[in-house]
Amino acid sequence: MANIFFVLGTRPEFIKIIEVVNELQSKSNHKIKLIFSNQQSKLIKKYMNNNIIHYDLEIKKFKNDSEFISSFLVKMEKLNNKIDIDYLFVQGDTNTAYAASLFGFFKKISIIHLEAGLRTFNIHKPYPEEFNRQSISKITNIHLSQTQSSKQNLLKEGIDKKIFVVGNPGIDYLVKNIKHNKIKNKIIKDSILITMHRRESLSSSLEIFIKNLKKFMKKNLNYQINWPLHTNPKILRNIKDNFKAEDNDNINFLKPQKYVDFLKLMMSSEFIITDSGGVQEEAAYLGKKLLVARDLTERIDIINLKLGYLIMADGSKLEKIMNYFNKKKVVNKQNTLKWRKSQGYGKSSKKILNIFNKNLE
Ligand code: UDP
């Protein structure tokens, strides 16, 4: 029996670990506890019932990455004096995941990394996530990769520790929520859902993306956009500065949506334009017409399967890809099925439970 501490602080971390936590808490002998960093306090409050958290590091005020990471390390030192940690479980590429792994490295605590091996191979895109995930891999003991291609990336980097291909427990959460809430895939023609939040886009490309989007919308009045805005104040300012009231007839700006409401929006949309990692995975799983507003993506299988198309962070290929889809191009069903298989059909957490029962003492 091991003491496993899950560390989380952001919305996607919650969505991707919660089914693993539920599975292990109900069906394993391991002791499962959650440590919360507070990295995205505003976004995550909508999702999380506070009583699932066992330890709150309460990092509430931080102006930059250095403040967040240093504060995380100091607070973990204090917490570690009071508790006995066998494994730190981290997800993805956030500063919370990076700081927790670094702490584990300093203390010689084993790290389990979920979503291991995603790569763009460009340390600045996405920023700081690509650096975070590459660094976490160097100090991880058990790598849980979503797909075979992620595993290959790790092997190429000479990683010889345990690597397991487990699918995507974020998709477990999606499948469960669709079923429980009986959400139907009723598509509203010409509806577009947008999410944008990448930090590296904020300096200039988001502004150009907005120009390209407005140009496209002016020429194509049939489209209707739903755009839940991220809480990042720089994004909100960018939107405020670049959209005037008359631009907004066909655009519905929304607050960050609760997961089930966002799921309903995804299901009813014909097109999804996003720079988000998780939304790319979910949109491809749902077989949506997916435009990836990035120069590069680490979800390269989605591009290779032609389930998503890169339109660049500045949206310079938005019009071209929308026109491509409108020439009656539908998403390739066979490839959607391949993607669904690789994501584990909603049974990824069960796979992780079996791995832990066999491999952790
Ligand atoms: N999401 C949500 N409400 C929203 C926008 C996104 O619940 O208004 C969910 C979405 O379904 C996905 C996750 O949040 O599971 C993606 O989070 P985000 O884009 O912040 O992070 P990333 O996936 O890029 O790390």
Image (cartoon, helix red, strand yellow):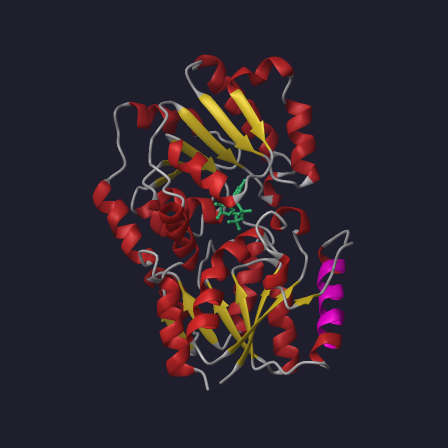
Q: Nearer the viewer, residue 283 or 322?
A: 283
Residue at left 51%, top 24%?
Answer: 213
* Residue 122 spot, x, y in % from top left: 51, 53
Residue at left 67%, top 51%?
Answer: 41
Q: Quadrant of residue 150?
A: bottom left
Q: How many marks?
A: 0
Residue at left 53%, top 72%?
Answer: 138
* Residue 125 spot, x, y in % from top left: 54, 49
- Residue 69 located within the stretch drawn in magenta: yes
Q: Quadrant of residue 153?
A: bottom left
Residue at left 66%, top 31%?
Answer: 238
- 347 lies left or right of 210: left
Q: Quadrant of residue 75?
A: bottom right
Q: Which residues are magenta?
A: 67-77
- 288 lies left or right of 123: left
* Residue 247 spot, x, y in % from top left: 58, 16
Q: Main secondary structure of the magenta part?
A: helix
- Residue 343 located within the stretch drawn in magenta: no
Q: Nearer the viewer, residue 333 or 84?
A: 84
